Amino acid sequence: MDIFSFLETIWVMVKFKGQLTRFEFAKSSINMYTVESTLNQYGVNVYGRSIRPGGYRTFLVTNKQAKYAEYLCFAANFPKMGTHFPENEDKRGVGLPKRQWEKGGRRKSPFLKFGDILKWF
């Protein structure tokens, strides 16, 4: 875990009073930046990224966004492990929905994401 993700994890744990859901992904050819940027495009904020033993990658989303985030992960056929919401299970591989945004879009996380830093270089 990088220092930015560590500090961000502490911050969101306090801010959301622990009301977070951890998503775990199998090691695969899909870049986690792709997963995170897809979720961000649909308004889901991702926090506290980490790599677990065995190469599993994880991140946190708020409980309020968890069901929608899982739906998006399944629809895009990302290698998410486990199911938090059984009703999302049948959405695997159906494709992402059309984006219908409110004017002005959604506010992003105030923390820099590792992918944002990479873009600068």
Image (tube, grey):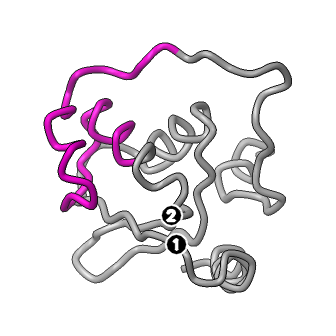
Q: Which residues are magenta?
A: 70-98
Can residue 110 be found in the magenta stretch?
A: no
Relative to 33, residue 82 above or below = below
Horizontal arrangement in the rendering, residue 24 relative to residue 69 (left or right): left
Examine the image and state in which quarter residue 113 appears: bottom right
Q: Nearer the viewer, residue 28 or 108?
A: 108
Going by the numbered disc 1, the residue's amino acid type is Leu
Q: Position of residue 51 (x, y in %)?
A: 40, 74
**Which one is earlier in the sequence, the residue at label 1 or at label 2?**
1
Question: Which residue sits at x=52%, y=46%?
Answer: 36
Gap between marks 1 and 2, in whole Å?
Answer: 5 Å
Examine the image and state in which quarter residue 71 appears: top left
Question: Which residue sits at x=65%, y=83%?
Answer: 17
Relative to 58, residue 79 above or below = above
What residue sits right under mark 2 in the picture? 63
What residue sits right under mark 1 in the picture? 20
- Residue count near mark 1 (Cα–Cα under 10 Å), binned few <14, some 14–19, many ≥20: some
Question: Which residue sits at x=57%, y=83%?
Answer: 18
- Give the SS element for disc 2: helix
Relative to 62, residue 4 above or below = below
Question: Which residue sits at x=74%, y=78%?
Answer: 15
